[in-house]
Amino acid sequence: MERFGPLAAPLIFQPGGGLDQREIYSEKHDVSANDSHRLPNKRVSSVARAASICQINAMSYAQSARSTFSDMLGTLDHLVVKAQDAGIADEVLGEKLTEDMFPLELQFRIALNQVLLALNQVGRKTLPLEQSAYRSLADVRAGIASVRSHIVQSDPAEWAAVDEPVDLNLPNGVRFLMSSEEDIRDWIMPNFYFHVTMAYALLRHAGLSLGKMDFLPHMARYRVPDDR
């Protein structure tokens, strides 16, 4: 198994089922899927409604995840641009708070890999992870732009159903078994936010003037103009 860093470990994605609802109905009732038009209208309608609800649920968690990833990738880009505008040198990528923590460069890279892992695990993609160290802030921006483009191109309707299983095996032997929705909510998203926060903290520690709204630049779209 390849390893991409302690918090960016690959996982084994085991999609569940895949049968069309009419095929499931047909197996249980010994009726061909092609003959579904002969089934009682009420039963066909119920199957169609159930399938529609499943698709809506899948799109709901997928759309939420895509929006969050897009906003916080915007945060990372904003932080890098602000560092460049302040004249901070590329050597800042080696910044650490303590000797036993990952440097800024790897904080950026693992954050981006969480998005790629999400797209691979439940978004039906097969994207390579960011494995080469960024040598400059410009490289970081390029990496962010690349990942953002993958998010924009992903279709929520193609994401795994909320209850499809994800079997996650970490390099240290720990194994998690959860649904696709739980994988995004309880594993991917917390790890993503952790490394975005570390990037903010390390740039702040390096002397970059940052405030709360530099972490939440997307909130500008909701701001109410001051009438005074």
Image: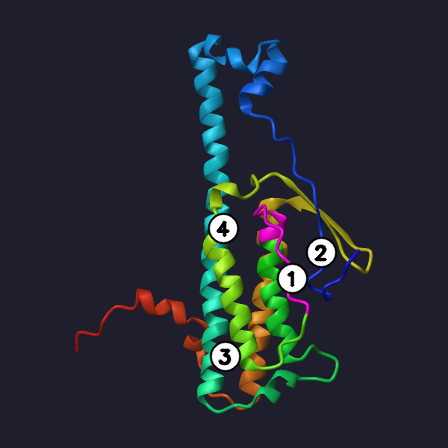
Residue bearing the label numbered 4: 154
Tell whether label 1 touches label 2 (CB within 8 Å). yes
**In the rendered structure, which disc, 2 or 3, sits on the residue that comes first in sequence?**
2
- Residue 78 in percent (x, y) is at 45, 76
Residue 129 — which label?
A: 1
Tell whether label 2 touches label 4 (CB within 8 Å). no
**Tag 3: residue type?**
Val
**Tag 2: residue type?**
Pro
**In the rendered structure, which disc, 4 or 1, sits on the residue that comes first in sequence?**
1
Magenta stretch contains residue 109? no
**Tag 4: residue type?**
Ser
Label 4 residue SS:
loop
Between label 3 and label 4, give the one nearer the viewer: 4
Residue 80 — which label?
A: 3
- Which residues, given as a range, are shown in magenta? 119-131
Q: Which quadrant holds residue 159?
A: top right
**Tag 1: residue type?**
Leu
Q: Is residue 210 visible?
A: no
Q: Which quadrant holds residue 93?
A: bottom right
Query: How far is mark 4 from mark 1, CA to CA?
Result: 16 Å
Label 1 residue SS:
loop
Residue bearing the label numbered 2: 10
Query: How far is mark 3 from mark 4, CA to CA?
Result: 25 Å
Query: How far is mark 2 from mark 1, CA to CA?
Result: 9 Å
**In the rendered structure, which disc, 2 or 1, sits on the residue that comes first in sequence?**
2
Between label 4 and label 2, give the one nearer the viewer: 4
Residue 121 — which label?
A: none
Q: Main secondary structure of the magenta part?
A: loop
Q: Is residue 87 left or right of residue 1?
A: left
Q: Is the residue marked by circle 4 packed among few (<14), some (14-19), or many (20+) residues within 10 Å? A: some
Label 2 residue SS:
loop
Label 3 residue SS:
helix
